[in-house]
Image (cartoon, helix red, strand yellow):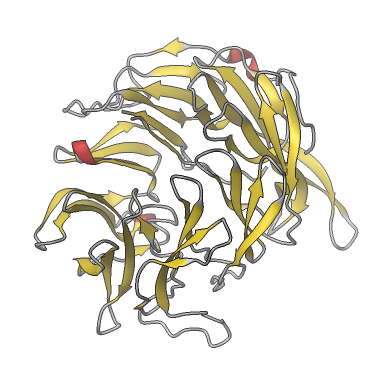
Amino acid sequence: MAAVVAIAAFLLVSNRPKGSDQPADAGRQGQEHTDATPDATVPPTELAAGGHILFTAEGDLWQMSANGANAVKLIDLDTIQRASRSPASNRIAYALGRTVTEAVTEHDGTIQDVEVIKVQLLLADADGSDSFLVHGNISRWGWIPDSDLLWYETATLQQLFDWGYGGDGDVWIFDPATREAEKFIHDDSDYWSLLRAEWSPDGEKLMFASGDVLRIADRRTRTIAEIFPLPYVGGDRGGPQPIPYLAWAPDSSSIYAIFSPFLLAGEEPNPDVDLKTKHINALRFPLDGNEPAKLMPEVPSTIVNEESYPRAHFSEDFSKAFYPRAAQSEADLVLAMYDFADQKEYVLLEDPGVPERELMPYGVPLAWVAGDSAYILRGEGDWLYDTARVSLLKVDYRTGSSETLAGRDGVSGQIGNVLFLPEAETLFFTSGGKLYSMNRDGVVPIADDLGDASQVEYHLE
């Protein structure tokens, strides 16, 4: 079974539902076979995985084997932000970012010229050839699972913290076979619409956070239902964050959620902020109208800051929950796992580290389970000053024995694009513009010059 992991950026990037015009800079696309990615270093061991890795480097689209060999440049445009293969792997969608100058009217009535990034969405064949324009101004986008359809949100020029193109709440569904798009929904939230947008595995429903509510849009009826209010804590920059960890059940019938509003250990809670709860809760919300199912007892915890540590998540089979929580002294943290079958909490790490400046941002997993072993990605330190360290640990959570499989000091960027292969005990991740593989052989860069916001998609068996 192929493991496909798409790491999608929220592109700040209006309202043409279809298009076949060739963009001005799309003439250089095509195939360019090379022996290696730019400055790539091939690791010493072949991984027990087939398939390939799709990634952007210096604005071009590349494909290579899991060990860093057999690199092929599929599209040479210098402005590609992200690319993704269709579920059937017969097409590649990709986004181009280009800087444009727009005249805007400020609050005082003055007119200013500002430079902003406008994003185009294009579609190519499986080998990167024969591109055509899907839409000239979009924000979020992706493939709908179990289909050959694209979805995207159009964008409009607006002032958020600064001027830029941002999503306007209009979601469209594009059929590559007919090259036609139909409007799906409009999210009319006053703020922060379509956050954490994710399609159900069967491709029938779109889950997203809008304002202070979790909503589900049905692709067949085009209706939007409210599931539950989100217990926002608020962030140190203001706004409705953090959002609880949310995930679709494999059968698309329910939503799994972990609520864990956090603040840095040792800090005093802001009395003006409603923390909602000082407990970690895991629940399953059925979409058939039944009451939510509580999956574990509430776990009391000192709050941990959203911007400094991953908050919580489930194992891939939803049999376990991982979360940092306060130790008994409430001065330190531990990394814990609750096993729903055992109805028991296991402490995986007494010292899970203090990853600073979003070294491990929201969405980076804490751990994975294979058999009785938990594999943990531990982060520590400040990447801005090259003092951060990441380690891959293996813990037998029943006996408590542990070992460090690999580690790297001097990490100079946030961790992202994470994929773990349990059978090979290998972790892929990006940091500081490089793609690494991490296993017992060490931590080896398999691609360089990816850029600070590198996007990687894994198609491994």
Is 446 placed above or below 253 here? Answer: above
Please give the name of the residue rendered at 39% of the width and 49% of the height, measured from the top-left corner: 413
Q: Nearer the viewer, residue 55 or 241?
A: 241
Is 216 placed above or below 236 here? Answer: above
In percent of width and height, residue 327 lies at: 26, 78
Q: Nearer the viewer, residue 217 or 174?
A: 217
- Residue 340, quarter of the rendered image: bottom left
Residue 79 visible somewhere in the drawing: no
- Residue 332, quarter of the rendered image: bottom left
Is 156 placed above or below 310 here? Answer: above
- Residue 319, quarter of the rendered image: bottom left
In percent of width and height, residue 283 lies at: 44, 65
The residue positioned farthest toward the right in the image shown: 109
Please give the name of the residue rendered at 89% of the width and 56% of the height, measured from the top-left corner: 110
Please give the name of the residue rendered at 52% of the width and 30% of the height, measured from the top-left corner: 83
The residue positioned farthest toward the bottom in the image shown: 271
Residue 243 visible somewhere in the drawing: yes
In percent of width and height, residue 316 lies at: 34, 48
In percent of width and height, residue 235 lies at: 54, 70
Q: Nearer the viewer, residue 178 or 403?
A: 178
